[in-house]
Amino acid sequence: MSFAFYYPLIWLGAAAVAAPIWLHLRRRIDSNVVRFSALQFLDDQPAVRRRSLSPRDLPLLLLRIAGLLLLVAAFAWPYRPDVETEVLIEESRVTILDNTLSHQAEGKFEEARALLLEELKGAGRTAQIAVVELTALPRVVVGFGDRPEEAADKVRALRPSHQRGSYLAAFRTADGLLDQSLGRKKRIILLGDSQTNQWNEGLHIPPFLERIELTLPTVTAPGAANFAVHEPSVRRVFLGEQAIVEASVRLFHLGTTTSPTVTLSANGNEIVRREVDLTGQPEVMTLSAQWEADPNQWLRGEVRVDGKPDTLEGDNRAFFSLPPVREIKVDLLARSPFLQTALSPEIARGRWKARVLSLEDLKTVENLKTVPPDDEADVLCIESQLLETAPARDRVLHCLNQGKGVVLWVNRITTVAKGFLRELGIDAQEEVTPAAGASGFRYIFSEHPVFHPFRSADSGDLMEIRVHKYRRLKVPEAVPLVFSEAGDALLFEQPKSKGKLLIAAFGMNRDDTNWPIHPTFIPFLDRWLHAARTEIVMPTAYQPGEVCVWNVPPDVAASEIVLRDAEREVLRAPLEEGRARFTVPDAPGLYALHYGESTEIGRFLEVNPAPDESWLTYTAPETTAETWCRPAANDPAASSAETVKMDLAPSEILRQKLWWWLLLAGLAALLTETGWLALRKDPA
Amino acid sequence: MTTGDSPTSAVFSASLLRRFDPNVLSALGGLDLKARYLVEGFLSGRHQSPFHGFSVEFSEYRDYLPGDDLRHLDWNLYARSDRLCIRKYTQETNVRFHMICDTSASMAYRGSAAWGTKFQVARILAAALTWLLLRQNDAVGLLSLGGGDEVPEFIRPSQKPSQFGLLLRQLERLHPAGGARLSALLGHATRLIHRRSMVVFLSDLLEPAQSIATAFEHLRFLGHECMILQILDRDEIEFPFSDGNVFEDLETGSRRFVAPRAARERYLQRFQAFMEEQRELFQRLEMPHCVVRTDGDPQQALARFLSERKRLP
């Protein structure tokens, strides 16, 4: 055992040894002394000469010290370094147990778990073992300090999950653990299926593993047959009086050309069941269906695929939901026929309830100031040329102050409009006509929710939009979302104190842009108006084990959110500052989200496995894994082995006989001292 | 002025106030309560208010003389009898009192029969006298040496009701420490007390008489009225020790081997001589001198004090 003077225990020990000596000397001094106030009348009495302090009852003092030393020795004995209590840690080992959905194929997870249990059982005292479970967030299941029995119990308790995890994240976690380990040799063992797309995620990563050996799984087959359904998508369409649900789902198949059966059911009814002939079909194909559904009811459904051979069943179902239709009110103060048409009931039904105001209406626009609160629109869509009228300007301010959204199309700048825009924090400058006659978009803030649908080509390509004319705007407080080729911002988002202001530097007419005749127009307008609303629209599609931060609408008075599946309550998460943070359940399915104890369903969360987990193609991992390893700077064998004292369990301490003898001897010495003192004080 | 209407009197029951009980005094928390207990108990045993004649009250009429203050003219009497009379009052005395509390280490002594240390007795007496004096509109101040240093802590006399709390806080902060310091304290008193005042000493006076005599003479020369409350323990007066022991001086720390039985007679002789010397000194200087025993009733000291107070204008 090493001592250091800055180690607090040594000072405690020193104090324990010094205390009896000090008490011994003090007691000798203070005994039989009367402190008196009138000693001046006794100054003829002999004075006491002060002597230097010296031990008096030497045997008593020695006995006290011996007793204490024995007690200290007894308590310190179990920690004395010797052959019994020291071991040499030869190897530190971290096993990554792949617990992603793909590893469930052909019972591989159970095999890996059994293998790990064997390894834990067979590990000697010279090896440290930790276990990292690879899930959405890799977690340390067994630490280096855990006892073998506890470690085995923890591993045995692991259940197959439906999550998607990253090999890279798991290796980084393992590396972090090995940094703190004591073994001379460090090793990471991967018990996984070596899925190709998981390794591909880690390509081009700079090396981060140093002097660590890797034991990777061997790949026996390049892939396995699998059917899956992914990414269900549903929306309501109104055709005249008909309310139709349009659903689409991606059918995935790998390594087989048989004909699986796809079943679509909604609200407990089977909508369609069909065999799909996969001969000559690509691995991913989109299936669509339409059916009539009550727009005022929640729609809950699932798509299921059944076929043989299928090595992974966990990805055979995909769940979807749709809330009842609630039309959002929008006031349209615009002369653009494209905006008026796009928001007409024929097109916007089920999504937007527009109050399109004609030129005649604008003449009596004062009436808008007296709209009852219940009838107020959520969004005001206005063109800048109409800001000439005072009621229109008042309306804009009113909406922003009431927490509503305003969508402003700057199609013309007049002096009055310019002044008003300045009041809103917008510096409207000159009109710009691109040199080439039209300008495309140079940059689009694609992370913004407005542009999410346009990331895939299905919703159209925004880069095809051309702007012929726009107004140069400087809005210091706004976030620019789209820039022209000349670098001028064209779309802005400006959060105001309560409401939200979205600004476009051009009008939606043919003179300014070709957007109104582009396929992206209606979807964009829909998203643009939604973005103007201050209501928080949360995504509802999640993957198992994903961490979700749920923003609760401000009008909800609840202290927690409750998640329930069809049968029982799954979790509760407290609300903090209007947000709840929770981990999405591991099992795929539909989960009803309630605010507090309310029985009303707030939303349905659709939990579906990650599509990547269905790709059961495997690859030899060496190439990728080797790029993660740094070349060894020196010989690992040259590094000194670290001698480590093992933590002793109480049972092991109590097994040491000498410890008991020391303890008894110490107590006996102190008992003798007490008896001796008692005899001396009371000779009788 | 009466004493029975004060709020504190309700705190103590009649039986409690009947006579001094050291156990009751010890059980009371806070110097404030202890002081009031002592004073209330003392006053309840008297049939006549000790404050008669001190307060502002009507005395007699006399005829108006040109130049008299018209504010004191009794207009009612003039209306009834057509006589111009002036109301006469007994005015406030407004005497300034200075409590001087000895905080030398010897004051920390508490004998086996005492109900408190000498310092505790001194502190309670000082608090009780302060309260008593403030009730009759006298100004009270305090001088002491606190915390073992030689820096005097001086509270100027005042009649304000808040003065009682101020003095109590100061008294509670004091603790006996250090060597003989009475002569130093007297030196500070002659320097700090300028106007003619009444000075009350609370000390055991266990210092050589010649060393303090000069300071007392100086005080007297300055015109101050002085009263000495000498606080002693039974052990100091009777020396009741029996076993052979080592005696250590509380102030100097010096030690002596003492065989009490053999030394007792000599001790008592020397102590009596010391006390006689003190008595002569205070008699010569016309300073009332009262011995307060820590095992006795401190109310006697209060009675003695009040009789001396009456002597003052």
Image: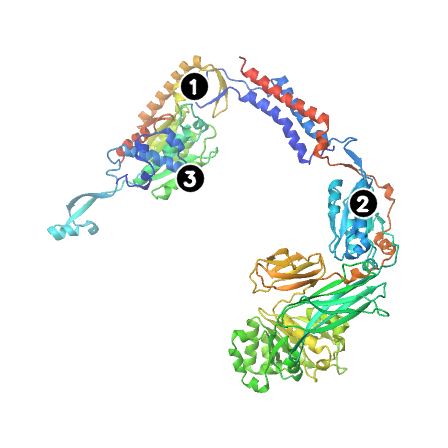
Residue A636, percent from left and from top: 86, 44
Residue A672, percent from left and from top: 62, 19
Whole-angstrom CA distance, mark 2 to mark 3, is 70 Å
Residue B200, percent from left and from top: 35, 33
Q: Which residue is mark 3?
A: B169
Vertical side of A404 occupied by B127: above or below: above
Task: Say whether residue A100 is left or right of residue A681.
Answer: right
Asked whether disc 2 touches disc 3, contact meaning CB atoms under 8 Å apart, the reply is no
Does any portion of residue A328 appear in the rendered image? Answer: yes
Q: Which residue is mark 2?
A: A93
Q: What crowding class fits label 1: few (fewer than 14 Cα within 10 Å), some (14-19), or many (20 or more)?
A: some
Q: What amino acid is labelled 2 in the image?
A: Arg
Task: Say whether residue A374 is left or right of residue A138.
Answer: left
- SS at circle 3: helix
Residue drawn at the location 15% of the way across and 45% of the way down = B62
Q: Which residue is mark 1?
A: A41
Circle 3 chain:
B
Residue A356: mark in rendering: none
Q: What amino acid is labelled 3 in the image?
A: Arg
Circle 2 chain:
A
- Dot 2 or dot 1: first in sequence order is 1
Task: Say whether residue B26 is left or right of residue A246.
Answer: left
Residue drawn at the location 46% of the way across and 14% of the way down = B259
Q: What amino acid is labelled 1 in the image?
A: Phe
Query: Quadrant of the rendered structure where residue B16 is?
Result: top left
